[in-house]
Amino acid sequence: MKGIYILTILIDKSIAVKVGAMGKIFFTQGFYAYVGSAQNSLEKRLNRHFKKAAKRKFWHIDYLLTEKHVNTVKAFFKDAEKSEECITAQRLGEIGVPVEGFGCSDCNCKSHLFMFSDRHLLENACLKLGFKPLALSCQ
């Protein structure tokens, strides 16, 4: 399966994280949505994001997800082309607060990571954008 996905992430304590060349970023405690794409193996990519084990860091999100106070809560997906990834990020940016420059070094988006005031607002936004919850979730 291929497509785009939205990870719902809980940061249970405000933390500062060194994110590759971006340097140190401060993350406030709360719920976040990360938009990504996997045009070859969606399940494999999402399984990678759910694993807490040490892994080679390819993407900005890898730096965040390996932190102690950060947990991937749920994943949503949509069968779509890569171009839909940026459209989704722009739509989420209308609702959530963007973490400037995160996850978008290969496009012109403001961000691909957004903070939300509450989990239900985040999940409802995913559903309204046509995403489906994926069974990998660990609620």
Image (spheres, helix red, strand yellow):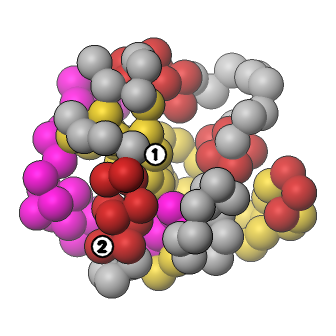
- Classify 10 Å Cα crowding around label 2: few (below 14), some (14-19), many (20 and above): few
Identify the amino acid type marked 1: Gly
- Three-letter code, disc 2: Arg
* Residue at 74% across, 34% down: 58
Give x and y (percent) for residue 10: 47, 54
Say if residue 28 shows up in the picture.
no
Foreground residue among 10 and 6: 6
- Mark 2, residue position: 91
Q: Which residue is mark 1?
A: 36
Q: Check the image and report above or below for 114 versus 47.
A: below
Say how many tags the image has. 2
- Asked if the stretch drawn in magenta spans residue 135, the answer is yes
Estimate the x, y position of residue 43 in percent, counting from the top left. Answer: 37, 19
Gap between marks 1 and 2 measured at Cα = 14 Å
Toward which corner of the image does residue 91 lie, by quadrant? bottom left
Q: Nearer the viewer, residue 108 or 72?
A: 108
- Which residue lies at the image location 58% right of the left edge and 61% below the top edge? 107
